[in-house]
Image: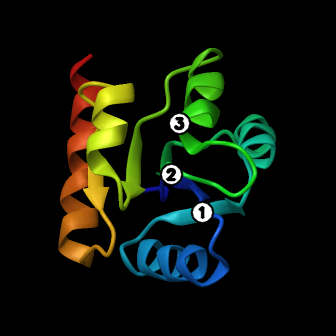
Amino acid sequence: MKALRVLVVEDEILIGMLLADTLGAMGYEVCAIEATETGAVAAAARCNPDLMIVDARLRDGSGVTAVEEILRTRWVPHVFVSGETLTIQALRPGAIVIQKPFREMDLSRAIQRALDAAASS
């Protein structure tokens, strides 16, 4: 079975690399790691991800806004990773959010919830 392509949107380089390594070990293919809102939107158009892992707060732009822009063209399951989970829930009720710092098990469960929600819609 072909590995799902994942776009990682994270402005902290080390966290982005950690996410990429963790996702790779979980059997996913990371198609891009982007640090900005503009970069995330461009990467989504370029690599057509099956899933996105997104930090809500970026130094240059917003992960929430990037997701909203990407979803205008097509639905992509996504998980927000943030230190401010309540803020994201207020902006996007029903969003799948995990708290930083996170455990691999939390990430795995959140990804499964996002994929299951996409499959049932």
Which circle marks residue 64 in the picture? 3
Q: Which of the 4 image quadrants contains residue 12?
A: bottom right
N-term mark: 3 or 1: 1
N-term mark: 2 or 1: 1
Which scheme is used to colour this image of the protein?
Answer: rainbow
Callout 3 amino acid: Val
- Relative placement, left or right, of 25 versus 46 is left
Where residue 118 appears, as percent x and y from the top left, is 31, 28
Task: Residue at 41%, 71% (x, y): give it.
Answer: 27
Where residue 52 appears, as percent x and y from the top left, is 50, 47
Residue beneath disc 2 = 54
Location of residue 118 with respect to 26 vertically, above or below: above
- Relative placement, left or right, of 114 versus 113 is right
Instruction: Estimate how packed mark 3 is, as few (under 14), some (14 to 19) or many (20 or more) residues with alpha carbons within 10 Å.
Output: some
Q: Secondary structure at mark 3?
A: helix
Cβ atoms at labels 3 and 2 below 8 Å apart? yes
Callout 1 amino acid: Glu
Which circle marks residue 78 in the picture? none
Task: Residue at 28%, 34% (x, y): give it.
Answer: 89
Which circle marks residue 10 in the picture? 1
- Relative placement, left or right, of 97 versus 66 is left
